Structures are given as C-alpha cells and as structure tokens.
Image: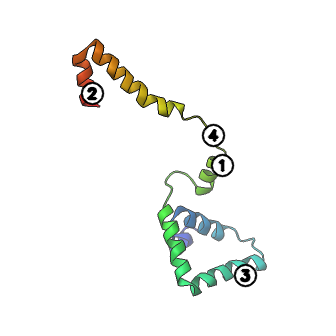
Amino acid sequence: MDRVFHALNNTNSSIGQEYLYKMIRETDKSEEELKKINDYANSFDEDEDSRFKIQKIFAFIGYAKHMAVSDYVDMIVELKPKSNIANYLSPILLIASLVVLLAINPSIGILLVILL
C-alpha cells in the first residue's frame, strides 16, 4: 500500500499527503461519497485558476516534520489563553539590571552592554 501511496503522491503539503493516505486506506466509502469526491476532482480539473490558487495555499503551508496536521490543529484548539506579562517584563528587567550593574561596577556593566 505504501508503494501505491508513493506512486500517487503529488502533493505539496502535509495536509495533502495525509488526506491522500487516508483516502487510499479507507475503502468503506459509499457510492454517493465517492461521486462527491469525484465531482470535486472534476471541478478542479475544469477550473485551472482555482486549482492553482489552492495549490499555492497548500504549498505555502508546507510540510509538518514531526506531527500530523490533525494532531497539530487539535493541540492548537485546546490551548488556553495565557498572560504575556513575562514577555513584556523580561526586556524591562534586563535593561534595569544593566543600569544597576553600570552604577555598581561600570567595567562589567559596559562589557555586558557591548555583548548584548
């Protein structure tokens, strides 16, 4: 089955690869479902502009290396909003600590300012 997948695979994204793999593996589609899929494929055959637009979008999305796209989407959906206060305070505290260090020990303070 993997050889069939590799022979048919002409996708430009992880989403395309996952969908193709799923379509090859799932053989329990009804005739109505298969007709609907065939109608979609025929519409893309006939409408070249739409086909290229969709291909560009999926090519831009690209390939996910270590995670299935469906797993990634599930993970994002389950994320809870968090506070960004640490991200905002970090640079302020860094600058404040450099100013204090410049006042206490100017040679080390100047060296750290140059390195950062």
Which residue is label 2 attached to? 113
Q: Position of residue 79 (x, y in %)?
A: 64, 43
The secondary element bearing badge 2 is classed as helix
Which residue is label 4 attached to? 81
Residue type (three-letter) at the residue carrying disc 1 = Val
Q: Position of residue 32 (x, y in %)?
A: 78, 79
The secondary element bearing badge 4 is classed as loop
Label whose residue precedes the other's in the sequence (4 or 3): 3
Q: Answer few, some or many: residues within 10 Å of disc 1's Cα (few below 14, many 20 plus, some between 14 and 19).
A: few
- Mark in the foreground, 3 or 2: 2
- Distance between the alpha carbons at the discs numbered 3 and 1: 32 Å
- At x 29%, y 15%, the residue is 103
The secondary element bearing badge 1 is classed as helix
Label whose residue precedes the other's in the sequence (2 or 1): 1
Residue type (three-letter) at the residue carrying disc 3 = Lys
Which residue is label 1 attached to? 77
- Distance between the alpha carbons at the discs numbered 3 and 2: 67 Å
Looking at the image, residue 70 sits to the left or right of residue 116; the answer is right
